[in-house]
Image (cartoon, rainbow, N blue to C red):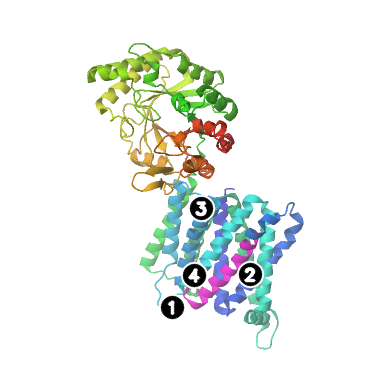
Amino acid sequence: MSYILLAIIGHLANAVAFIIDKALLTSAFKRSATYAAMIGGLSLLVLFAAPWVEHWPSIELALPILAYGGFFVFGLWAFFEALKRSEASQVVPVVGSLIPLFTLLGAWILLGERLTGHQFFGFIFLIAATVILTARRSSGPIRLPLMILSAMLFAVSFVAGKFAYMHADFLGVFVSSRAVAGILGLLIGLCYTPARQELMAIFIPSRSSTTLHRRFTILLTLFGQLMGAFGFILINIAIARGSVSIVNALQAVQYAAIVLVAWFATDRLRKLLNEDRKPRTILTKSFAIVLIAVGLGLMAQGPSVDVKTEYGITWSKPYAESLGIDPYEGLQATLDDLGVRHFRIPVYWSEIEPRAGEFEWDALTHQLEMIRERGGDIILVIGAKQPRWPEWWAPKWLDALSPADQEAAQLRYVETVMRHYADYGIFIKAWQVENEPRFSFGTHKPQSKEFLKREMQRVRQIELELSTGKNPRPIYTTDSGELSLWRHFRAETDGLGVSVYRVVIHPRFGVWRYSFLPPWFYAKKFQLLFPFSKKKIFVSEFQMEPWAIKPLTELPPEEQFKTFDITQMRKNFWYAERMGMPEIYFWGAEWWYWMKVKQQHPEFWEQGKALF
């Protein structure tokens, strides 16, 4: 059973418990501490499950378990106190809406939990439904600090519980945290005099109270707590299995159930729940129930990160040489030590044709053979604009030609490369034509859009000829992931590679972080811009090295670490795993190797091993 379904059933059980809570707070209990103490104390019943605990949590989890059990009881106390001092029409929507929001914030900060695109929008729909279902006009006093305090205490409790469940067995965490809640409930009941007196009045016979009324109160209380316990257990299982933020947002289902019960219940129950059946109210809350259905539908579509991602790297021979490392030795280490099998290899025109009409294949062929021998595959990048500074890699002899002859020479170079490596078959799995060709970055202004289209069309023509029209290799190009709308060359290509940079240096603002972009941003941006497109999108360039305005060899490590250190590398890997992209090519493996063999910082290389 999915954790979402478990959470829904749990919240439905809580709806029954909530109705009983409301009845008891109205008739039986006068103090909020009494109810908090009783619920907390009843948690000790979970100790009957202690013999089945195989592995108790370690001492390192003592703090989150204390927070899980303790803050939950104090959250109940604050919630019931707010209910006593204010109207439920104020308390329930505020607390019910703030708990998921505070939980989402806490899970993001402390657990690194992120919602995918579908989940995020489903989350928003559920929060909106909660507000609509629970909000009513009220003229009573507003106890906002108490409401905020209650929501924060519940959120901290749930986040601490999720942390504990991530690091220990479910039953051990559940029993120990409920034991904490139980002990705290007993302490409140024993030490807080008003609560102790009220509990004694309920459970100990007195002349002023009838036996029948007392028994009914006790039985109703126990049944309510039984339903609450059942719902609580299911919700805890759901938290352990899935997103704590989503589980809390699903409480909208609980409020919808309460509304439906009130609509079809007796007048007495409807009055107790303060629910009316005016046409306007029914229409508004029916809309909220539709929002819940939409939100659940979005959740059911599943996270985009279910896509199986293949990871690779871009390897640049000139860049490796500029760092002072042997490019073939570094490539071999990348293949044999890191275990990389997917590569993006640039065909630098200035190196492959240093003199007009004279091609030098040895260096490039050696790289391709090293990869092919180990069963890898390659996206071969052809064109004048290539990865790595200065971006423009046309040979010097081209400057002496007219613009028309320059374009003709470029088309000849592209065709020559494709025909030379025609027998490599599917080992070269795709052709990338130019690198971010219309993005103004580098030492040369972008070539005309018309010529670039002709170049891509020519590549398509040659590939169809080489493959005799059977399973032709796809044609890709690339663009900036953050600073472009990706609208170029859709008709000429089969897919788009986008760059992803997390920390850069802006000439005006200094170090600039793209922390505000969630992992699903790039995939959802593509879906938004091209909703009916079947073309492929992938990450062609994912930052895994420092951003600098001068060569890295001229910067000491501490300067480089201002934009990229080992912590940022781990964050970037975490981000990449949640992007939901079919392929991601990391940018910076040459730097990892250089830091290992030349700078005595092997941690980047070792971290790379953790992914590949």
Residue 439 vertical placement versus 145 (above, below): above
- 361 left or right of 113 in image: left
Residue type for callout 3:
Trp
Q: With respect to residue 186, does 193 lie above or below?
A: below
Between 605 and 167, which is closer to the camera in this rendering? 605
Image vertical order of residue 335 relative to residue 12, above or below: above
Judging depth in this view, the residue of 132 and 162 nearest the camera is: 162
Could you tell me if the residues under marks 4 and 1 are in contact, i.e. CB atoms within 8 Å? no
For marks 3 and 2, the one nearer the N-term is 2
Badge 4 marks a residue whose secondary structure is: helix
Q: Earlier in the sequence, mark 3 or mark 4?
A: 3
Residue located 69% across and 78% down the image? 203
Q: CA distance from mark 1 to mark 3?
A: 33 Å
| Mark in front: 4 vs 2 | 4
Tell me how far mark 1 sits from mark 2, CA to CA: 27 Å
Quickly name the residue at label 1.
141
Dot 2: what SS? helix
Residue 583 position in % (x across, y down)? 47, 32
Q: Quadrant of residue 37?
A: bottom right
Marks 1/3 in contact by CB < 8 Å: the verdict is no
**Where are the magenta residues, as a range?**
65-89
Q: Which mark is residue 572?
A: none
Q: Amino acid at mark 1?
A: Pro
